[in-house]
Image (cartoon, rainbow, N blue to C red):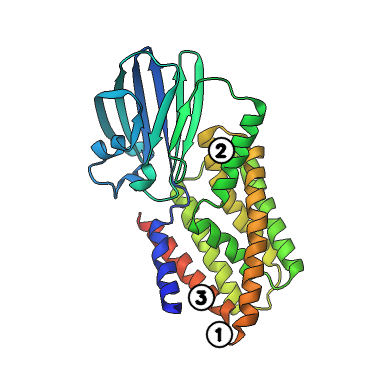
Amino acid sequence: MRRALCLALLASPAYAHVLSMSSGDLVIIGARAHYELRMPLYEVTPVPNPERTLLQHIRFAGARLVRSECRTDTARDTYVCAADYEFAAPVDRLEVECTFTAITVPNHVHLLRASLGEKRDTAIFELGFTRTTMRFRPPTSAEIAIAQAGAGFVRALGGAVQVLFLAALALAARSRRELLAIAAMFLLGQVASVLTMAHVSWQPAPRFVEAATALAVAYLAVEILLLPQAGARWLVAGVLGALHGLYFHLFVQTTGYSPVLVLLGAALAEVPAIAVLALALSRVGRLAKAFRPVQVAASALLAFGMVWFLLRLRS
């Protein structure tokens, strides 16, 4: 059982694209539409025949593909596909299905911006949310708040890596008081990162964010293993929060969503998750104290972080 868990943790970084996003723009004029897809090159590499496969995994109901062309934008490390579609008649609303998660990674997110004359609509597709109807009407304030906070909530728990990240924080806490300090500093670091990055010219590459995060997770594991009495783990949690905030910054930058709403949704997911994970780890620690579960978990976390870091350097 322990061996299987370790193998799973070591293998998971291969699929651990925390920052797995693509975007697309659809412009509808009468009975015709033009779609442009932009996806990071590292997401396209494992996809067979991407010039054909990618467009097969996004479908616009009632539309016939007329022409398509794909190319590599080396300067931006992006793969770009442009396609023209034709409908049987002009449309006033559109049903869309997107299954990029089936050919990239399970936590992949696709942001689709669509326009019909002066009307605009936006949709986010991910695992479990692969279909939507775009109605091209202005959303209400309540709909905007729910959608953007909900997006932050889902992003915070959008994959195994995010859950492992929060588990690392719970694992580092040696008391309830320290858990509160670690969680608070993590959230503050996250907020500070998002708000600061909005006002600086440097924009981090997704590969850099993932590599830096992997190293930070590995360092926290080293501290748990080799410095069990070390203080100021809350400071390490703040650094981890700042690195995790870069992910939310990239998400906000891509979607144009409100950082306040996205971070609010993320906090509503992260705080209960950290509490539940801490409770589960404490009970496991009491029931299986002889097996030194904290040390075993920290060792697996260290291996995970280092493998993840090396894979991101090579990708």
What residue do we see at 32% from left, 18% from top? 87
Residues under labels 1 and 2: Cα distance?
A: 43 Å
Q: Nearer the viewer, mark 1 or mark 3?
A: 1
Q: Which mark is residue 291?
A: 1
What residue do we see at 63% from left, 36% from top? 146
Question: Badge 3 is on which residue?
Answer: 299
What residue do we see at 58% from left, 83% from top? 292
> Quarter of the image holding residue 314?
bottom left
Q: Which mark is residue 242?
A: none
Q: Which mark is residue 252?
A: 2
Secondary structure beneath label 1: helix
**Which numbered disc flags the more N-terminal residue, 1 or 2?**
2
Task: State left or right for residue 77 relative to residue 1.
Answer: left
What residue do we see at 24% from left, 46% from top? 48
Q: Nearer the viewer, mark 1 or mark 2?
A: 1
Picture coordinates of residue 181, whole percent (x, y)? 73, 62
Task: State left or right for residue 96 relative to residue 175.
Answer: left
- In the picture, the quarter occupied by the C terminus is bottom left
